[in-house]
Amino acid sequence: MRTVFDPDARHSLIVRLRSLSPESQARWGRMNAPQALCHMADQVRCALGDIPTQPRRSILNNRLIRFFAVHLLPWPKGRIPTVPEMLTATPGVWEEDRSSLEALLERAAERGEDGEWTEHPAFGRLSGREWGWLIYKHTDYHLRQFRA
């Protein structure tokens, strides 16, 4: 499983981010590219504790079900409900928003698997290793959404 902690995997995300433009068209979902960029950044901010999260009880709190959801099952296109914490930022200047996301990916990598990580609002308590996988997969999902 690719992870944000792997320098090559992280670099590939950043290269793909730089191929996006504000005009990039989504293949699915309701977000436009600027909104998706802010949403991806909000997810990393939640992981790092920059945005306080409100944990919810859900079936995804179960480790086995969470493993299947994160690693084995394909994520549905456009049908995944988003927690409000990951929809807090509003698009601003494109280059600044993209640079901010790149910096957040680097901060997450610097924190490392053994760092202090916050609780995910839907998945519950995650290890650093799990956050690394989830940040990578979530960013990749949205980049594929915009053909990047």
Image (cartoon, rainbow, N blue to C red):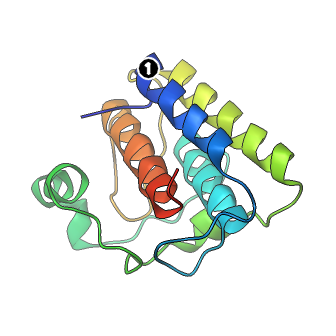
For residue 35, say whether it is visible: yes
Residue located 56% across and 81% down the image: 30
Residue 22 placement, left or right of 125 = right
Residue 118 placement, left or right of 18 = left
Residue located 60% across and 66% down the image: 85
| Quadrant of the image occupied by residue 74 | bottom left
Helix, strand or loop status at disc 1: helix
Residue neighbourhood size for the residue with mark 1, other residues' Cα within 10 Å, grouped as few (<14), some (14–19), many (≥20): few
Nearest the viewer among 21 and 113 is 21
Counting from the top left corner in percent of width and height, residue 10 is at: 49, 28
Q: Looking at the image, which residue sits at the far right?
A: 93
Counting from the top left corner in percent of width and height, residue 5 is at: 43, 24
Residue located 75% across and 63% down the image: 89
Residue 112 placement, left or right of 26 = left
Q: Amino acid at mark 1?
A: Asp
3 shown above or below 83: above
147 shown above or below 18: below
Counting from the top left corner in percent of width and height, residue 143 is at: 51, 53
124 shown above or below 100: below
Residue located 57% across and 51% down the image: 46
Quadrant of the frame with the N terminus: top left
What residue would you read off at disc 1? 8
Nearest the viewer among 1 and 115 is 1
For residue 49, say whether it is visible: no
Nearest the viewer among 145 and 104 is 145
Counting from the top left corner in percent of width and height, residue 105 is at: 59, 34
